[in-house]
Image (tube, rainbow, N blue to C red):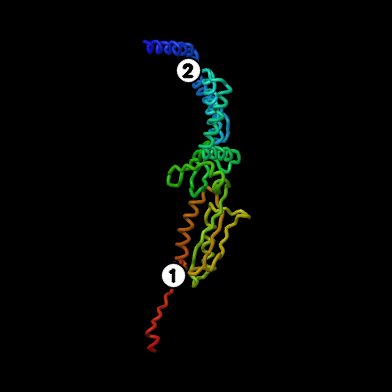
Amino acid sequence: MDSFKDLETVLNKYGQKLIDYLPSIALAIVMLVCGLWIIKFINRLVAKFFLRKDYDITLEKFIQSLINWGLKIVLFVLVITQLGVESASLVAIIGAAGLAIGLALQGSLANFAGGVLILLLKPFKVGDFISAQGIDGTVKEISIFNTKLNTFGNQLAILPNGKLSNENIINYTEEPFRRENLTFGVSYDCDIKLAKEILLNLVNEQETVLQLEDKAPMVVVVALADSSVNISVRYWANIADFWNLRFHILEEGKVRLEAAGIVIPYPQRDVHIYNKHTDIAK
């Protein structure tokens, strides 16, 4: 009988507290639902605002993500406070949780800081072709924590912003022009001046090669290698014309050199065999 009385007392006590908390719980749920709807509505307004303005798409996505998460954190604090948690206690809990999360997620925080640096310094933007961390590709998206690249093989590469902001980056599309440096190796027995003339004429025939005063094409001997005389073909071109021009000059250059009797050698080695027993007999 005593156990039943104790159970009844406990049920009455906590049942009454639950009834007292029901209005706060109901209000917190309503606040959560309404808050999520308002956040969604604000996100739509922000997206429409950026559609009307000509801002950098990378900055737009970063700001949208920052606003979204910031509003959700504020909503979380309001809901918890509505449930009866005191502000001072909540601040202490958030501080302790923040310290623990910060220690556990040092890499993620470094990536976040790296994302902020990339957006501020703008070493590249969406649509640029870059080389970073041994990967070449076109920038598809720059988010808070990582950057996505589309590689030449149409593969998705995801690079963490922390390392990306602290390592070397080559941006191939930042400048409107790009300089090529093709090397052709010809035999030592061939006419070097004729080979240079053929290659220079080939370059000058291309309409997409820039013929500016400070960007004139040139063909020079750059090395006397073990098996060949290396000739460098240097010219400038627009980014859009660069690769097609490179492929054409490589192929046509080989064809024209061979048609003129100029040999493009391959690495070779002379081997001398020494017969010890024959020398002794002699």
**Along the viewing direction, whichever of 38 and 52 lies nearer the viewer:** 38
Up-down relation of residue 13 to residue 201 (above or below): above
Furthest residue in direction left, as rendered: 1
Percent of width and height locating residue 154:
43, 44
Percent of width and height locating residue 83:
51, 18
Q: Which mark is residue 268?
A: 1
The image quarter containing residue 63 is top right
Task: Assess disc 2: are there few (<14), some (14-19) or many (≥20) residues with their C-alpha within 10 Å of its C-alpha.
Answer: some
**Left or right: where does residue 52 sit relative to residue 279?**
right
Task: Assess disc 1: are there few (<14), some (14-19) or many (≥20) residues with their C-alpha within 10 Å of its C-alpha.
Answer: few
**Along the viewing direction, whichever of 127 and 2 lies nearer the viewer:** 2
Up-down relation of residue 162 to residue 47 (above or below): below
The three-letter code of the residue at mark 1 reads Gln
Tally of numbered tags: 2
Residue that badge 2 annotates? 29
Q: Residue at x 45, y 12 (%)?
A: 13
Q: Which mark is residue 25?
A: none
Q: Earlier in the sequence, mark 1 or mark 2?
A: 2
Furthest residue in direction bottom, as rendered: 282
